[in-house]
Image: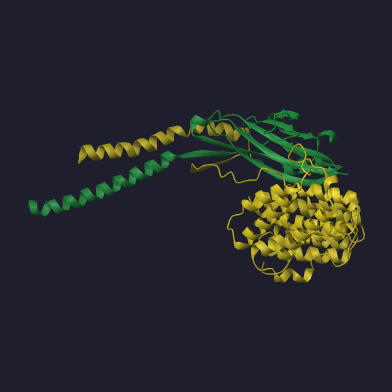
Protein backbone atom coordinates (compact mmCIF):
# COMPACT_ATOMS: atom_id res chain seq x y z
CA UNK A 1 0.00 0.00 0.00
CA UNK A 2 2.69 2.39 1.05
CA UNK A 3 4.43 1.67 -2.19
CA UNK A 4 1.36 3.01 -4.07
CA UNK A 5 0.55 6.05 -1.86
CA UNK A 6 4.06 7.53 -1.68
CA UNK A 7 4.36 8.41 -5.39
CA UNK A 8 0.97 10.15 -5.23
CA UNK A 9 2.04 12.12 -2.14
CA UNK A 10 5.28 13.04 -3.83
CA UNK A 11 3.40 14.37 -6.88
CA UNK A 12 1.03 16.36 -4.66
CA UNK A 13 3.95 17.82 -2.74
CA UNK A 14 5.66 18.82 -5.98
CA UNK A 15 2.52 20.56 -7.19
CA UNK A 16 2.17 22.38 -3.88
CA UNK A 17 5.78 23.51 -4.13
CA UNK A 18 5.24 24.82 -7.65
CA UNK A 19 2.10 26.67 -6.54
CA UNK A 20 3.86 28.20 -3.55
CA UNK A 21 6.85 29.28 -5.60
CA UNK A 22 4.43 30.88 -8.09
CA UNK A 23 2.67 32.72 -5.24
CA UNK A 24 6.02 33.83 -3.85
CA UNK A 25 7.09 35.27 -7.22
CA UNK A 26 3.71 36.97 -7.65
CA UNK A 27 3.95 38.46 -4.17
CA UNK A 28 7.48 39.70 -4.77
CA UNK A 29 6.62 41.32 -8.10
CA UNK A 30 3.61 43.02 -6.54
CA UNK A 31 5.81 44.20 -3.70
CA UNK A 32 8.05 46.06 -6.17
CA UNK A 33 5.23 47.85 -7.96
CA UNK A 34 3.95 51.21 -6.86
CA UNK A 35 1.29 53.66 -7.94
CA UNK A 36 2.34 56.28 -10.45
CA UNK A 37 0.39 59.50 -10.40
CA UNK A 38 1.13 61.46 -13.54
CA UNK A 39 -0.31 64.95 -13.27
CA UNK A 40 1.24 66.18 -16.52
CA UNK A 41 -1.48 68.32 -17.96
CA UNK A 42 -1.03 68.98 -21.68
CA UNK A 43 -4.28 69.42 -23.52
CA UNK A 44 -6.10 71.77 -25.89
CA UNK A 45 -7.11 74.16 -23.11
CA UNK A 46 -3.52 74.58 -21.92
CA UNK A 47 -2.33 74.89 -25.52
CA UNK A 48 -4.87 77.64 -26.26
CA UNK A 49 -3.98 79.50 -23.07
CA UNK A 50 -0.24 79.39 -23.90
CA UNK A 51 -0.73 80.42 -27.53
CA UNK A 52 -2.98 83.26 -26.53
CA UNK A 53 -0.43 84.60 -24.05
CA UNK A 54 2.30 84.41 -26.65
CA UNK A 55 0.71 87.17 -28.70
CA UNK A 56 1.97 89.45 -30.25
CA UNK A 57 5.18 87.39 -30.39
CA UNK A 58 5.75 84.77 -33.10
CA UNK A 59 6.11 81.16 -32.09
CA UNK A 60 9.73 80.33 -31.27
CA UNK A 61 10.03 77.06 -29.34
CA UNK A 62 8.19 74.55 -27.20
CA UNK A 63 9.28 72.10 -24.55
CA UNK A 64 7.67 69.77 -22.06
CA UNK A 65 10.02 69.27 -19.12
CA UNK A 66 9.04 66.09 -17.32
CA UNK A 67 9.57 65.84 -13.60
CA UNK A 68 9.51 62.76 -11.40
CA UNK A 69 9.54 63.66 -7.72
CA UNK A 70 11.79 61.42 -5.69
CA UNK A 71 12.91 61.03 -2.10
CA UNK A 72 15.67 63.57 -2.66
CA UNK A 73 15.57 67.09 -4.03
CA UNK A 74 16.55 67.53 -7.67
CA UNK A 75 17.80 70.22 -10.01
CA UNK A 76 17.12 70.56 -13.73
CA UNK A 77 18.53 73.25 -15.98
CA UNK A 78 17.27 74.01 -19.48
CA UNK A 79 19.28 76.17 -21.85
CA UNK A 80 17.41 78.52 -24.18
CA UNK A 81 19.38 79.91 -27.14
CA UNK A 82 18.50 83.50 -27.95
CA UNK A 83 19.62 85.45 -30.95
CA UNK A 84 20.79 88.94 -31.65
CA UNK A 85 18.39 91.80 -31.77
CA UNK A 86 15.25 89.81 -30.99
CA UNK A 87 12.87 90.10 -28.07
CA UNK A 88 11.48 86.99 -26.46
CA UNK A 89 8.50 85.94 -24.41
CA UNK A 90 8.36 82.88 -22.19
CA UNK A 91 5.05 81.30 -21.18
CA UNK A 92 5.15 78.74 -18.37
CA UNK A 93 2.29 76.43 -17.48
CA UNK A 94 2.77 74.42 -14.31
CA UNK A 95 -0.77 73.09 -13.87
CA UNK A 96 0.73 69.65 -14.48
CA UNK A 97 2.71 69.73 -11.25
CA UNK A 98 1.29 68.41 -8.02
CA UNK A 99 4.10 69.66 -5.85
CA UNK A 100 5.67 73.06 -5.73
CA UNK A 101 8.78 73.61 -7.86
CA UNK A 102 10.97 76.70 -7.77
CA UNK A 103 11.61 78.31 -11.14
CA UNK A 104 14.59 80.60 -11.54
CA UNK A 105 16.02 82.17 -14.69
CA UNK A 106 19.67 83.14 -15.04
CA UNK A 107 21.95 84.69 -17.63
CA UNK A 108 24.52 81.93 -17.22
CA UNK A 109 24.49 78.22 -16.33
CA UNK A 110 24.67 76.94 -12.76
CA UNK A 111 28.37 76.20 -13.18
CA UNK A 112 29.09 79.94 -13.13
CA UNK A 113 29.42 81.52 -9.69
CA UNK A 114 28.90 85.09 -10.81
CA UNK A 115 25.69 84.62 -12.74
CA UNK A 116 22.77 87.00 -12.48
CA UNK A 117 19.27 85.96 -11.52
CA UNK A 118 16.71 87.42 -13.93
CA UNK A 119 13.55 85.85 -12.56
CA UNK A 120 12.45 83.89 -9.53
CA UNK A 121 9.07 82.29 -8.97
CA UNK A 122 7.32 79.06 -8.10
CA UNK A 123 5.07 76.64 -9.89
CA UNK A 124 2.24 77.66 -7.57
CA UNK A 125 1.62 80.51 -10.03
CA UNK A 126 0.23 77.76 -12.31
CA UNK A 127 0.45 79.86 -15.47
CA UNK A 128 2.61 82.90 -16.03
CA UNK A 129 4.33 84.98 -18.67
CA UNK A 130 7.85 86.36 -18.48
CA UNK A 131 9.51 88.66 -21.01
CA UNK A 132 13.26 88.51 -20.38
CA UNK A 133 14.75 91.99 -20.58
CA UNK A 134 16.82 92.47 -23.73
CA UNK A 135 19.82 93.64 -21.70
CA UNK A 136 20.11 90.24 -20.03
CA UNK A 137 19.60 88.03 -23.04
CA UNK A 138 23.10 87.59 -24.37
CA UNK A 139 22.95 84.49 -26.58
CA UNK A 140 21.58 82.19 -23.90
CA UNK A 141 19.31 82.11 -20.93
CA UNK A 142 19.03 79.31 -18.37
CA UNK A 143 15.86 78.09 -16.72
CA UNK A 144 16.47 76.27 -13.45
CA UNK A 145 13.86 73.99 -11.90
CA UNK A 146 14.54 73.33 -8.23
CA UNK A 147 12.51 70.27 -7.32
CA UNK A 148 11.94 69.44 -3.65
CA UNK A 149 12.01 65.95 -2.20
CA UNK A 150 8.73 64.12 -2.65
CA UNK A 151 6.58 64.52 0.45
CA UNK A 152 4.71 61.30 -0.35
CA UNK A 153 7.82 59.29 -1.24
CA UNK A 154 7.26 56.83 1.61
CA UNK A 155 3.65 56.06 0.78
CA UNK A 156 4.44 54.12 -2.39
CA UNK A 157 3.15 56.83 -4.73
CA UNK A 158 5.41 58.04 -7.52
CA UNK A 159 4.44 61.59 -8.34
CA UNK A 160 5.17 62.72 -11.88
CA UNK A 161 4.37 65.97 -13.57
CA UNK A 162 5.63 68.45 -16.12
CA UNK A 163 6.24 72.08 -16.95
CA UNK A 164 5.00 73.36 -20.29
CA UNK A 165 7.26 75.99 -21.80
CA UNK A 166 6.17 78.02 -24.80
CA UNK A 167 8.23 80.84 -26.20
CA UNK A 168 7.89 83.51 -28.83
CA UNK A 169 10.11 86.04 -30.54
CA UNK A 170 9.82 89.33 -32.35
CA UNK A 171 12.31 91.59 -34.10
CA UNK B 1 6.01 20.01 4.72
CA UNK B 2 4.30 22.20 6.73
CA UNK B 3 6.66 24.52 8.53
CA UNK B 4 8.65 25.12 5.36
CA UNK B 5 5.58 25.64 3.24
CA UNK B 6 3.83 27.80 5.80
CA UNK B 7 6.89 30.04 5.85
CA UNK B 8 6.93 30.38 2.04
CA UNK B 9 3.20 31.04 1.98
CA UNK B 10 3.53 33.67 4.71
CA UNK B 11 6.24 35.49 2.75
CA UNK B 12 4.17 35.45 -0.44
CA UNK B 13 1.01 36.65 1.29
CA UNK B 14 3.00 39.12 3.36
CA UNK B 15 4.43 40.71 0.23
CA UNK B 16 0.95 41.08 -1.23
CA UNK B 17 -0.46 42.52 2.00
CA UNK B 18 2.47 44.92 2.36
CA UNK B 19 1.88 46.14 -1.19
CA UNK B 20 -1.82 46.63 -0.54
CA UNK B 21 -1.05 48.76 2.52
CA UNK B 22 1.62 50.76 0.68
CA UNK B 23 -0.66 51.96 -2.07
CA UNK B 24 -2.70 54.18 0.26
CA UNK B 25 -5.86 54.41 -1.77
CA UNK B 26 -7.05 57.38 0.23
CA UNK B 27 -4.10 59.43 -0.93
CA UNK B 28 -4.74 58.47 -4.54
CA UNK B 29 -8.37 59.46 -4.31
CA UNK B 30 -7.45 62.89 -2.92
CA UNK B 31 -4.95 63.43 -5.73
CA UNK B 32 -7.46 62.52 -8.38
CA UNK B 33 -9.93 64.95 -6.90
CA UNK B 34 -7.31 67.68 -6.89
CA UNK B 35 -6.56 67.25 -10.55
CA UNK B 36 -9.17 65.92 -12.90
CA UNK B 37 -6.55 65.36 -15.59
CA UNK B 38 -4.40 63.13 -13.42
CA UNK B 39 -3.80 59.64 -14.75
CA UNK B 40 -3.46 56.85 -12.23
CA UNK B 41 -1.80 53.67 -13.31
CA UNK B 42 -0.13 50.72 -11.60
CA UNK B 43 3.23 49.95 -13.11
CA UNK B 44 6.42 48.28 -12.09
CA UNK B 45 8.85 50.72 -10.51
CA UNK B 46 11.63 51.74 -12.79
CA UNK B 47 14.19 54.47 -12.87
CA UNK B 48 13.17 57.64 -14.67
CA UNK B 49 14.21 57.49 -18.30
CA UNK B 50 15.59 60.99 -18.24
CA UNK B 51 16.87 61.08 -21.79
CA UNK B 52 15.34 64.40 -22.68
CA UNK B 53 17.71 67.12 -23.76
CA UNK B 54 18.60 69.99 -21.46
CA UNK B 55 18.24 72.66 -24.11
CA UNK B 56 15.57 74.21 -26.28
CA UNK B 57 15.81 73.66 -30.02
CA UNK B 58 15.60 77.08 -31.62
CA UNK B 59 13.35 78.05 -34.48
CA UNK B 60 14.88 77.44 -37.92
CA UNK B 61 12.50 80.06 -39.30
CA UNK B 62 13.87 82.63 -36.88
CA UNK B 63 17.43 81.80 -37.91
CA UNK B 64 16.50 82.51 -41.54
CA UNK B 65 14.68 85.69 -40.53
CA UNK B 66 17.88 86.89 -38.83
CA UNK B 67 20.00 86.03 -41.89
CA UNK B 68 17.52 87.79 -44.15
CA UNK B 69 17.51 90.94 -42.01
CA UNK B 70 21.33 90.83 -42.05
CA UNK B 71 21.37 91.15 -45.81
CA UNK B 72 21.23 87.55 -47.04
CA UNK B 73 19.62 87.72 -50.48
CA UNK B 74 18.23 84.97 -52.67
CA UNK B 75 20.74 82.85 -54.57
CA UNK B 76 19.10 80.97 -57.39
CA UNK B 77 19.79 77.23 -57.46
CA UNK B 78 21.53 77.00 -54.08
CA UNK B 79 18.80 75.01 -52.34
CA UNK B 80 18.38 71.24 -52.49
CA UNK B 81 16.17 70.23 -55.41
CA UNK B 82 12.72 68.92 -54.38
CA UNK B 83 13.25 66.24 -57.02
CA UNK B 84 15.70 64.55 -54.64
CA UNK B 85 12.90 63.74 -52.16
CA UNK B 86 12.46 60.15 -53.34
CA UNK B 87 16.19 59.42 -53.18
CA UNK B 88 16.37 59.39 -49.39
CA UNK B 89 15.99 55.85 -48.16
CA UNK B 90 16.82 55.48 -44.47
CA UNK B 91 14.77 57.19 -41.77
CA UNK B 92 17.86 59.14 -40.71
CA UNK B 93 18.31 60.51 -44.26
CA UNK B 94 14.63 61.35 -44.51
CA UNK B 95 14.65 63.24 -41.20
CA UNK B 96 17.81 65.16 -42.06
CA UNK B 97 16.33 66.19 -45.40
CA UNK B 98 13.02 67.03 -43.74
CA UNK B 99 15.16 69.64 -41.95
CA UNK B 100 17.02 70.64 -45.11
CA UNK B 101 13.76 71.18 -47.01
CA UNK B 102 12.27 73.10 -44.08
CA UNK B 103 15.23 75.49 -44.20
CA UNK B 104 14.91 75.77 -47.99
CA UNK B 105 11.20 76.44 -47.68
CA UNK B 106 11.74 79.21 -45.08
CA UNK B 107 14.47 80.71 -47.27
CA UNK B 108 12.17 80.70 -50.31
CA UNK B 109 9.18 82.10 -48.40
CA UNK B 110 11.26 84.96 -47.01
CA UNK B 111 12.56 85.68 -50.51
CA UNK B 112 9.16 85.51 -52.24
CA UNK B 113 9.92 82.31 -54.15
CA UNK B 114 6.38 81.06 -53.80
CA UNK B 115 6.39 78.35 -56.46
CA UNK B 116 9.50 76.69 -55.10
CA UNK B 117 8.40 77.02 -51.48
CA UNK B 118 5.18 75.12 -52.32
CA UNK B 119 7.27 72.33 -53.84
CA UNK B 120 9.35 72.19 -50.66
CA UNK B 121 6.24 71.96 -48.52
CA UNK B 122 5.11 69.00 -50.64
CA UNK B 123 8.52 67.35 -50.22
CA UNK B 124 8.27 67.86 -46.45
CA UNK B 125 4.80 66.31 -46.43
CA UNK B 126 6.12 63.27 -48.29
CA UNK B 127 9.00 62.88 -45.84
CA UNK B 128 6.73 63.41 -42.83
CA UNK B 129 4.41 60.65 -44.10
CA UNK B 130 7.38 58.33 -44.52
CA UNK B 131 8.76 59.01 -41.05
CA UNK B 132 5.57 58.65 -39.02
CA UNK B 133 4.88 62.35 -38.68
CA UNK B 134 1.88 62.70 -40.95
CA UNK B 135 0.05 64.25 -37.98
CA UNK B 136 1.66 67.59 -38.83
CA UNK B 137 -0.40 67.78 -42.01
CA UNK B 138 -3.44 65.81 -40.90
CA UNK B 139 -5.12 68.69 -39.13
CA UNK B 140 -5.53 72.26 -40.22
CA UNK B 141 -4.82 71.63 -43.95
CA UNK B 142 -1.47 73.43 -43.92
CA UNK B 143 -0.67 72.73 -47.56
CA UNK B 144 -4.06 73.89 -48.85
CA UNK B 145 -3.95 77.10 -46.80
CA UNK B 146 -0.36 77.69 -47.88
CA UNK B 147 -1.33 77.43 -51.56
CA UNK B 148 -4.40 79.59 -51.22
CA UNK B 149 -2.44 82.31 -49.40
CA UNK B 150 0.46 82.53 -51.83
CA UNK B 151 1.02 86.19 -52.52
CA UNK B 152 0.19 87.19 -48.96
CA UNK B 153 3.60 86.95 -47.28
CA UNK B 154 2.37 87.61 -43.73
CA UNK B 155 -0.21 84.83 -43.99
CA UNK B 156 2.32 82.44 -45.47
CA UNK B 157 4.82 83.18 -42.67
CA UNK B 158 2.06 82.67 -40.16
CA UNK B 159 1.32 79.24 -41.72
CA UNK B 160 5.05 78.43 -41.61
CA UNK B 161 5.12 79.24 -37.90
CA UNK B 162 2.12 77.00 -37.38
CA UNK B 163 3.89 74.23 -39.31
CA UNK B 164 6.93 74.57 -37.05
CA UNK B 165 4.83 74.63 -33.89
CA UNK B 166 2.87 71.54 -34.95
CA UNK B 167 6.09 69.70 -35.72
CA UNK B 168 7.57 70.59 -32.31
CA UNK B 169 4.42 69.64 -30.43
CA UNK B 170 3.93 66.34 -32.28
CA UNK B 171 7.52 65.41 -31.53
CA UNK B 172 7.23 66.37 -27.84
CA UNK B 173 3.94 64.51 -27.42
CA UNK B 174 5.53 61.38 -28.84
CA UNK B 175 8.71 61.65 -26.75
CA UNK B 176 10.75 61.93 -29.94
CA UNK B 177 13.10 64.74 -28.98
CA UNK B 178 15.97 62.89 -30.60
CA UNK B 179 14.01 63.06 -33.88
CA UNK B 180 13.69 66.83 -33.49
CA UNK B 181 17.46 67.06 -33.09
CA UNK B 182 18.05 65.26 -36.41
CA UNK B 183 15.55 67.51 -38.21
CA UNK B 184 17.10 70.62 -36.67
CA UNK B 185 20.61 69.44 -37.59
CA UNK B 186 19.51 69.19 -41.23
CA UNK B 187 17.85 72.62 -41.10
CA UNK B 188 20.83 74.23 -39.36
CA UNK B 189 23.37 72.84 -41.82
CA UNK B 190 21.30 73.97 -44.83
CA UNK B 191 20.80 77.44 -43.34
CA UNK B 192 24.49 77.80 -42.56
CA UNK B 193 25.42 76.50 -46.01
CA UNK B 194 23.33 79.19 -47.70
CA UNK B 195 24.54 81.91 -45.32
CA UNK B 196 28.22 80.98 -45.56
CA UNK B 197 28.04 80.74 -49.33
CA UNK B 198 26.92 84.37 -49.38
CA UNK B 199 29.35 85.46 -46.63
CA UNK B 200 32.47 84.02 -48.24
CA UNK B 201 31.79 86.06 -51.37
CA UNK B 202 31.06 89.35 -49.62
CA UNK B 203 32.28 91.55 -46.82
CA UNK B 204 28.86 91.70 -45.16
CA UNK B 205 30.02 91.96 -41.55
CA UNK B 206 26.51 91.88 -40.12
CA UNK B 207 25.75 88.56 -41.82
CA UNK B 208 29.13 87.19 -40.79
CA UNK B 209 28.46 88.07 -37.14
CA UNK B 210 25.11 86.32 -37.25
CA UNK B 211 26.72 83.25 -38.76
CA UNK B 212 29.32 83.16 -35.99
CA UNK B 213 26.52 83.51 -33.44
CA UNK B 214 24.99 80.37 -34.93
CA UNK B 215 28.25 78.47 -34.49
CA UNK B 216 27.64 78.59 -30.72
CA UNK B 217 24.77 76.14 -31.32
CA UNK B 218 27.30 73.44 -32.26
CA UNK B 219 27.74 71.95 -28.75
CA UNK B 220 23.98 71.36 -28.61
CA UNK B 221 23.93 69.78 -32.07
CA UNK B 222 26.65 67.41 -30.90
CA UNK B 223 24.70 66.58 -27.72
CA UNK B 224 21.61 65.97 -29.87
CA UNK B 225 23.46 63.58 -32.17
CA UNK B 226 25.00 61.75 -29.23
CA UNK B 227 21.57 60.90 -27.75
CA UNK B 228 20.40 59.23 -30.98
CA UNK B 229 19.12 55.70 -30.41
CA UNK B 230 19.55 53.03 -33.13
CA UNK B 231 22.84 54.51 -34.25
CA UNK B 232 24.24 53.73 -37.66
CA UNK B 233 27.44 54.56 -39.51
CA UNK B 234 25.57 57.56 -40.91
CA UNK B 235 24.97 58.94 -37.43
CA UNK B 236 28.59 58.44 -36.38
CA UNK B 237 29.92 59.97 -39.57
CA UNK B 238 27.72 63.04 -39.29
CA UNK B 239 28.54 63.45 -35.59
CA UNK B 240 32.29 63.24 -36.29
CA UNK B 241 32.02 65.96 -38.94
CA UNK B 242 30.00 68.27 -36.68
CA UNK B 243 32.57 67.74 -33.90
CA UNK B 244 35.37 68.58 -36.37
CA UNK B 245 33.61 71.84 -37.27
CA UNK B 246 33.15 72.70 -33.59
CA UNK B 247 36.81 71.90 -32.87
CA UNK B 248 37.93 74.14 -35.71
CA UNK B 249 35.72 76.99 -34.45
CA UNK B 250 37.07 76.60 -30.91
CA UNK B 251 40.66 76.46 -32.10
CA UNK B 252 40.66 79.94 -33.65
CA UNK B 253 42.96 82.03 -31.52
CA UNK B 254 41.37 85.02 -29.80
CA UNK B 255 37.83 84.16 -30.91
CA UNK B 256 36.54 82.83 -27.61
CA UNK B 257 35.66 85.39 -24.96
CA UNK B 258 35.44 85.20 -21.20
CA UNK B 259 32.64 82.71 -21.10
CA UNK B 260 31.33 79.86 -23.18
CA UNK B 261 29.20 81.96 -25.50
CA UNK B 262 31.03 85.24 -25.98
CA UNK B 263 33.41 85.71 -28.86
CA UNK B 264 35.32 88.39 -30.71
CA UNK B 265 34.48 88.25 -34.41
CA UNK B 266 37.12 90.86 -35.27
CA UNK B 267 39.79 88.14 -35.18
CA UNK B 268 38.14 86.28 -38.05
CA UNK B 269 39.70 86.56 -41.49
CA UNK B 270 38.36 85.53 -44.89
CA UNK B 271 40.25 82.27 -44.64
CA UNK B 272 38.24 81.33 -41.54
CA UNK B 273 34.93 81.89 -43.32
CA UNK B 274 36.24 79.89 -46.27
CA UNK B 275 37.07 77.01 -43.93
CA UNK B 276 33.65 77.25 -42.22
CA UNK B 277 32.06 77.11 -45.67
CA UNK B 278 34.22 74.21 -46.79
CA UNK B 279 33.31 72.09 -43.78
CA UNK B 280 29.61 72.98 -43.79
CA UNK B 281 29.39 72.40 -47.56
CA UNK B 282 30.91 68.94 -47.10
CA UNK B 283 28.37 68.16 -44.37
CA UNK B 284 25.55 69.42 -46.56
CA UNK B 285 26.68 67.42 -49.60
CA UNK B 286 26.82 64.35 -47.41
CA UNK B 287 23.25 64.88 -46.25
CA UNK B 288 21.59 65.88 -49.50
CA UNK B 289 23.14 63.28 -51.73
CA UNK B 290 21.25 60.00 -51.53
CA UNK B 291 22.59 57.03 -49.51
CA UNK B 292 24.81 58.99 -47.13
Q: In which quarter of the image is the N terminus of chain B?
A: top left
Considering every residue shown, the one lying at the far left of the view is A1
Which chain is drawn using green? A
Left or right of A124? Residue B107 is: right
Left or right of B148? Residue B130 is: left
Residue B103 seen from this side: yes
Depth check: give the residue in front, B67 or A46. B67
Depth check: give the residue in front, B285 or B111. B285
Residue B144: x percent and y percent? Answer: 82, 62
Q: Which colour scheme is used?
A: by chain
Residue B86: x percent and y percent? Answer: 71, 71
Considering every residue shown, the one lying at the far front of the view is B253
Q: Chain B is drawn in which colour?
A: yellow
Left or right of B41? Residue A101 is: right
Residue A36: x percent and y percent? Answer: 53, 39
Q: Which residue is drawn at 25% across and 37% down?
A: B6
Tell me which corner region of the image, top left, top right, bottom left or bottom right, holds residue B105: bottom right
Residue B201 lies, with reference to residue A21, above or below; the image says: below
Residue B208 lies, with reference to residue A54, above or below; the image says: below
Left or right of A51? Residue A7 is: left
Residue B141: x percent and y percent? Answer: 79, 59
Residue B62 seen from this side: no
Total of numbered circles in the picture? 0
Depth check: give the residue in front, B201 or B136. B201
Q: In which quarter of the image is the C terminus of chain B?
A: bottom right
Q: Residue at x 82, y 44 (%)?
A: A83
Amino acid sequence: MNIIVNPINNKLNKMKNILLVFLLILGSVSGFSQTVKNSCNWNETVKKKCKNDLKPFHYYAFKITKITFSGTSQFKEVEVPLFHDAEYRFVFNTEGLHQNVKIEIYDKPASYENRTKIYSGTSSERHFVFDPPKSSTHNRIYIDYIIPANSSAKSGVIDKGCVIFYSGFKH
Amino acid sequence: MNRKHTLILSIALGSTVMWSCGSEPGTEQKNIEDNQEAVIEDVAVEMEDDDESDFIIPSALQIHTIFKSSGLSYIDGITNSPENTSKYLSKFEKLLNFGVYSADMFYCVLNDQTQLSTQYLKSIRTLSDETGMSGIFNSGSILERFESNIGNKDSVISIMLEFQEKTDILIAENNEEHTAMVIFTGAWIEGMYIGLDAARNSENEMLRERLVEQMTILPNLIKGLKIQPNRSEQTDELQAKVIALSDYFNSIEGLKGNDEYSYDVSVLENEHYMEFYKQVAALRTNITKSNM
